[in-house]
Image: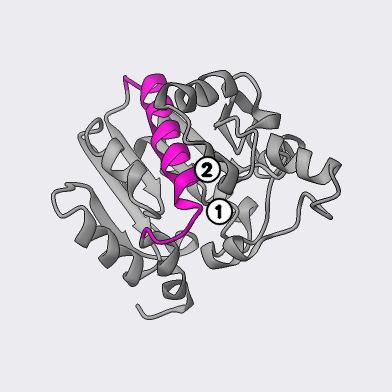
């Protein structure tokens, strides 16, 4: 399946400055989901990305299926994590079909990539088992460091996409209110909301300050209560 999604594989090869943030975000939120879903046995995950979440989830759910529309991203993942036992299916999210039902569906940093996030959320309702749980995670335009940059006149628009966003294939940012709007439009309600990584400074500054791992953990722990100020928003929807 040769397609335009393959051009974004560069973002997942570990050579960008923002990999610093991604390593924090993408190791934190899967653990939060695991903590909330100890009872779940089967997981349908949308997107491989950097591979952090898939490798974490594969250790906790006996049945783990991952969907990705890019063969290049899939091959990059397999070369980095050859021991991962997750079943990987190459498909566009909108075209995926199965008779199987899953205890847990996770869309981790996916909705900012797709053409129609509401359609995607609606499409995956039918793959959720009775009593099953669904989690979504998205980037937040109003994270603290962007708010500060905007107030200082260094950022013209908090919704503005950066060069890094285009490399990643992002089409949009979210905020707490706009995420809620899309969740409602897709026929869901939000039953849990958390912040992912309370980031106070620009990435270059965070790297230069060489924070101790305990401080980085504190940014994540404190951020749980402040989704409107964090890099990412994690929500359980029903």
Look at the image and tell me whether residue 162 can be seen: yes
What residue is shown at x 62% (from left), y 66% (from top)? 163
In the rendered image, the quadrant that contains the C terminus is top right
Per the image, is 232 magenta? no
Residue furthest to the bottom: 2
Which range of residues does the magenta coloring cover?
14-39
Whichever of labels 1 and 2 marks the residue nearer the N terminus, that label is: 1
What residue is shown at x 38% (from left), y 69% (from top)? 70
Q: Quadrant of residue 201?
A: top right
SS for callout 1: helix
Q: Residue 130 vs residue 182: left or right?
A: left
Q: Residue 203 vs residue 33: left or right?
A: right
Per the image, is 29 magenta? yes
Residue at the disc numbered 1 = 120
SS for callout 2: helix
Q: Residues within 10 Å of mark 2 (few under 14, many from 20)?
A: few
What secondary structure prevails in the magenta region?
A: helix
Q: Position of residue 74 (x, y in %)?
A: 30, 63
Q: Position of residue 101 (x, y in %)?
A: 35, 40
Look at the image and tell me whether residue 131 can be seen: no
Instruction: Estimate the spatial distance between the alpha carbons at disc 1 and disc 2, rounded to whole Å.
Output: 39 Å
Q: Quadrant of residue 145?
A: top right
Residue at the disc numbered 2 = 208
- For the residue pair 6 and 214, the one nearer the viewer reads as 214
Q: Do the CB atoms of the residues marked 1 and 2 lie less than 8 Å apart?
A: no
Depth check, mark 1 against mark 2: the one in front is 2
Q: Residue 74 vs residue 49: left or right?
A: left
What residue is shown at x 51% (from left), y 52% (from top)? 18
What residue is shown at x 32% (from left), y 20% (from top)? 38
Q: Position of residue 220 (x, y in %)?
A: 51, 26
Q: Which mark is residue 202?
A: none
């Amino acid at each position: 399946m040769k397609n335009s999604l393959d051009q974004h594989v560069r973002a997942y090869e570990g050579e960008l400055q923002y990999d610093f943030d991604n390593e924090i975000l993408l190791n934190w939120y899967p653990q939060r989901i695991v903590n909330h879903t100890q009872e779940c046995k089967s997981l349908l995950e949308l997107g491989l990305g950097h591979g952090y979440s898939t490798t974490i989830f594969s250790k906790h759910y006996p049945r783990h299926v991952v969907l990705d529309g890019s063969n290049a991203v899939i091959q990059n993942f397999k070369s980095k994590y050859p021991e991962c036992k997750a079943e990987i299916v190459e498909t566009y999210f909108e075209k995926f079909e199965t008779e199987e039902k899953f205890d847990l569906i996770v869309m981790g940093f996916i909705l900012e990539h797709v053409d129609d996030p509401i359609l995607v959320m609606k499409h995956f309702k039918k793959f959720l088992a009775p009593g099953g749980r669904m989690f979504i995670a998205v980037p937040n335009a109003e994270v603290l460091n962007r708010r500060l940059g905007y107030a200082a006149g260094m950022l013209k628009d908090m919704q503005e996409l950066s060069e890094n966003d285009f490399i990643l294939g992002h089409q949009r940012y979210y905020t707490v209110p706009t995420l809620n709007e899309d969740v409602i439009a897709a026929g869901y309600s939000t039953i849990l909301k958390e912040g992912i990584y309370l980031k106070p400074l620009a990435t270059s500054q965070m790297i230069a300050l060489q924070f101790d791992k305990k401080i980085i953990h504190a940014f994540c722990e404190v951020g749980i209560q402040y989704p409107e100020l964090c890099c990412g928003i994690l929500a359980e929807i029903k």
